[in-house]
Image (tube, rainbow, N blue to C red):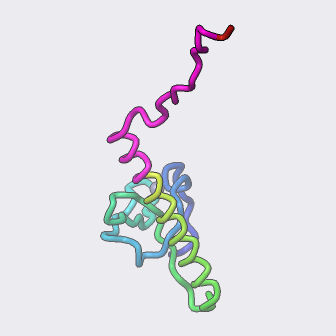
Amino acid sequence: MSTTTLCAFCESLPERSALHAAKIVRCPLCKTDLGVSPAGDKFRVVAVTPAVSHRGRNIAAAIGFAASMVLGAIVMMMAAGAQNPVANTPSKDIASPAPSAK
Ligand SMILES: [Zn+2]
């Protein structure tokens, strides 16, 4: 909550509100609160201050929603790729000319 110096690990983590955390752990190095999402991703817990207006909150929600949509799309693309490894099968053109051209 106060001004603490983050360790290198925590500094690399994205910031999210505690609302996204399935559980909250504490970094053993810098004592920063770390949230763990239901998917297992770790992030730095930032307090949602009352100064943040509804507009800012909506923007943050929209960004989070877009990020989750992109992530979902990537996962679905990877799943589809795993099921269908050869997606670009070469199309057979009519390449062989007819021998009776004369
Ligand atoms: Zn840390």
* Residue 71 is a magenta residue: no
Against 46, residue 74 (above or below) is: above
> Closest to the observer: 29 or 100?
100
* Residue 76 is a magenta residue: yes
Q: Which residues are magenta?
A: 75-100
> Closest to the observer: 56 or 91?
91
Left or right position of 27 against 16: left
Q: Which x, y percent locates residue 25?
A: 34, 64
Give the residue displayed 56% in from the left and 60% down from the top. 5
Number of marks: 0
> Closest to the observer: 82 or 14?
82
Q: Which x, y percent locates residue 45?
A: 46, 70
Quadrant where the C terminus sits is: top right
Q: Which x, y percent locates residue 43?
A: 45, 62
Give the residue displayed 60% in from the left and 9% down from the top. 100
The chief SS type of the magenta part is loop
Against 93, residue 42 (above or below) is: below
Against 43, residue 63 (above or below) is: below
Give the residue displayed 58% in from the left and 84% down from the top. 58
